[in-house]
Amino acid sequence: RALALGAVDCYAKSGGGMGLDDAGMLAQMIREAAKVRFSPRAPAAAPSTITRIAAEVRGTLADRPALIAIGSSTGGVEALQTVLSGFPADCPPTLIVQHINARFAPAVARTLDQSCPPKIMIAEPDMPLKDGHVYLAPGDDRHLSIGGSSTFHCKLRSGEPVSGHMPSVDVLFASVAEIARTIAQDEATCTVFGMPRAAINLGAARIVAPLGSIARHAFSKAA
């Protein structure tokens, strides 16, 4: 609930006191939190507003993508609520990697499922990707990516952290990079302008947009 209300991050301390690993991870989270630009929390969108946005998006579904991949980190849970609230209930299958501790992933999935039109769940190995469903990485020691060719499914595999994260957004994006167009959140609406900045600096972002318009761009024929 704290994450949904705008908390920068949550840390699940291991049992038996704080060890060196705990201290290192906590220090990193504090460094990331120090980069956050705080602003007053905007009120949640009214149901009528969500319905209108979903209707606008649905009007472009003839040209919609086969699937959508989303990566988010610090401040990402609140941003995900904003973006997914603009998705119609029959959106293309969507995979999400949120850099978060596994202990909090189920609660995040439940919160998003209760407030957004699509069905939102924790991804499981070989789970087939279906319209109207959003699959959130478990947040444990497995990376989430897309498997399959003619039909797609969730692929979860163990490994080392990538770019300091497990699961890593990089792994998910690498699995769709050759067929994807990239939308990056603009600096003005970011809690921390980190991953979007990296995509923009690499020239990988086809569109740079405010958070509130990302859902529209995801389904836009011109995107």
Image (cartoon, helix red, strand yellow):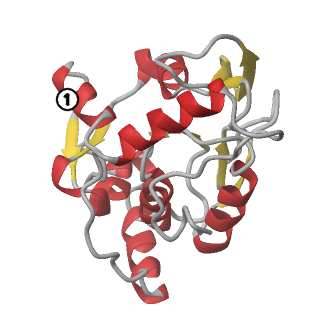
- Front-most of 109 and 40? 40
Q: Residue at x 38, y 83 (%)?
A: 43
Give how far across and how far down residue 49 sits, in percent: 39, 83
Q: Is residue 218 visible?
A: yes
User: Where is 108 relative to 126, above or below?
Assistant: below
Horizontal and vertical percent position of residue 182: 32, 32
Where the N terminus falls, by quadrant?
bottom right
* Image position of 99 with respect to 40: above or below: above
Location of residue 156 by image quarter: top right
Q: Locate residue 89: give its quadrant.
A: bottom right
78 vs 183: above or below: below
- Horizontal arrangement in the rendering, residue 111 relative to residue 91 (left or right): right
The picture places residue 199, in percent across and down from the top left corner, at 27, 27
Between 110 and 92, the residue placed more toward the observer is: 110
Residue 30 image-quadrant placement: top left
Left or right: 41 in relation to 209: right
Q: Is residue 71 left or right of residue 35?
A: right
Q: Secondary structure at mark 1?
A: helix
Quadrant housing the C terminus: top left
Expressed as whole percent of the image width and height from the top left, the position of residue 18 reads 69, 37
Q: Which residue is mark 1?
A: 200
| Residue at the image point whose x is 76% and y is 40% from the top | 17
